[in-house]
Image (tube, rainbow, N blue to C red):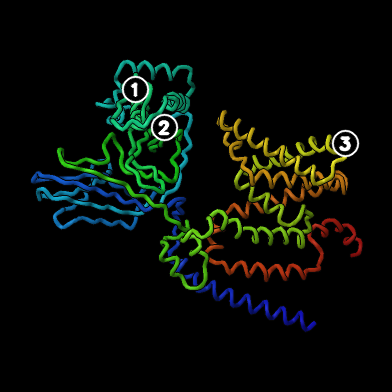
Amino acid sequence: MKSKTNLTILLILITIITMISIGFKIKPIFDNYDDFNPEAVYKIKYTFFFKSDKPNTTVRTYIPKNNLRQTISREKIRNDTTMFFLKKEEQKDNIRAIWNTKNETLSHSIEYEFVFSGKSKKFKIPKNFVREKNKHKEYLTASKNIQSDNLKIADLAIQLRKNTKNDREVIKNVFDYVYKIPSAPIITLTDAITTLEQNIASCNGKSRLFVALLRSLGYPSRIKGGIILENTDKRTSHAWAEVLINEVWVPFDTLNNHFAYLPAKYLEIYHGDKSLITHTKGIQFDYIYQITQENHISFLKMNSEELNALSGFSLWNLVDKKTIPIKSLHLLLLLPIGGLLIAFLRNIVGLKTFGVFLPVLIALSLLHTGFLSGIAVFVGLIIFMGLISYPFDRLGLLYTPKLVISLTIMVAVIFIATSYGLKYDIEWLTKLTFFPIIILTIAAERFSSSTVEDGYLIALHKLLQTIIATTVSYFLLSLSWLPSILILFPEIIVLIIVISVFLGRYIGIRWIEIFRFNPILKLER
């Protein structure tokens, strides 16, 4: 009895110390809460080098601004004292950075640096659009490189509109046509007509043709310019299109097959059929975009240095120095949380599952495959395991060799399914990677062995309860902010141990048993 009391006191002390440690970090974290919740954070630096023998030299570039899916922060500008800098807002909300110098025959270096925080944006396209003939004329008229009044483009546009029932189908037909045009890294400017005639183009040619076709059909459209952010240095920018749908500019990237969707790593810089960089003619000029992906906590405004400076203990240092791959760290941190949930469902609720961590591992695999498709694969594997086990059972094979054969067959199935998914563009089939499939295969094999040991009825009951536990685990572990909380507050792992001890000492009636024995309990009253 005394040992139990001492254990309780020890657990209470550990809990108090842990809560104090957590308390030191709560205030600065709440003070820096960011409801923007970006999916990607990059540091970008434009670097320009030029030399001129002209008395007046100018370098101009468009720079990004905040909008609903991106924020720009920590802006820094570095240039020598002979340079004059001006930031100018042009019509239609484009912002231009302008550097000017009057010195001759001098080499100059300019750096413009900022941090981009972005998230993806998916738009729902209605069947029919509201269009006003007298509005947005500039986005309906032809231009030098967007020849929407050309007969070839007009004829093609009319052909693409045939047999369509609504505006959405028209947009989809035009998009699919331009997307299927072969792409090539053409660095020179390609207008809409050239793209149509040569049937090959880069992002700027495809975007101009897409816009030209839609303008010809009366849909206000424009070019959008920016950079696809990657953890590397690059010299290429990117162009896509936007269509005005019910007074909302909706993005369409005909090069990368993004229909009414913009990924988190797309940096929006300007709109209109423009050049990102312009400069005085005849000067020696070069440039580079230096892009570095930054680790971040999605719901905090704090950078890496500020996160490392937090009081108390956190695992941010492991993330910042890339000691452990971020996905592996998330997996390790989520396992105890999932295990605690399953322990609660087994000890308190009374569910019977195939092991403790197997439902958690299944839930983690569903995070990769998607819930519905993952469950469908799980059920399919159970049927598949039953089918392939039958002939091996007839041969009298032992359990372990039979499992090896099953897993080997599943590896072959993965390759076949993935190849099929890539060929026919079935996204969920391409997600059947090794780890999720092996976990789902082991779970299916556990069901198969349970049918032999306990019979089909008990095995089906366990399977159903395992799926219930997996579903609850999935919705808990799919919370995007949960891994970040565990990184900031690793003390939670200690609390999991404390809670598990109390769970282990629980000897009361389970919730399922209350419903099960409810008629008897009523009789006793």
Q: In this view, does 364 lie above or below 31?
A: above
In percent of width and height, residue 287 lies at 26, 45
User: Is mark 1 in CB contact (under 8 Å) with mark 3?
Assistant: no
**For the residues marked 1 and 3, what is the alpha-carbon distance in whole angstroms?**
69 Å
Identity of the amino acid at label 2? Leu
Q: Is mark 2 on a helix, strand or loop?
A: loop
Q: Is mark 1 on a helix, strand or loop?
A: helix
Q: Quadrant of the C terminus?
A: bottom right
Q: Mark 1 or 3 closer to N-term?
A: 1
Residue identifier under label 2: 255
Q: Is residue 224 above or below residue 68?
A: above
Identity of the amino acid at label 1? Ser
Q: In the rendered structure, find residue 216 and report the number of the disc placed on it.
A: 1
Give the number of the mark in front: 2 or 3: 3
Q: How many residues crowd around disc 1 within 10 Å: few (fewer than 14), some, or many (20 or more)?
A: many
Give the number of the mark in front: 1 or 3: 3
Residue identifier under label 3: 394
Q: How many residues crowd around disc 3 within 10 Å: few (fewer than 14), some, or many (20 or more)?
A: few
**For the residues marked 2 and 3, what is the alpha-carbon distance in whole angstroms?**
54 Å
Q: With 50 as the anchor, is 348 left or right in this view?
A: right
Give the number of the mark in front: 1 or 2: 2
Residue drawn where x is 29% and y is 49% of the image: 46
Q: Mark 1 or 2 closer to N-term?
A: 1
In percent of width and height, residue 390 lies at 83, 36
In this view, the residue in front, 502 or 291, is 291
Q: How many residues crowd around disc 2 within 10 Å: few (fewer than 14), some, or many (20 or more)?
A: many
Q: Mark 2 or 3 closer to N-term?
A: 2
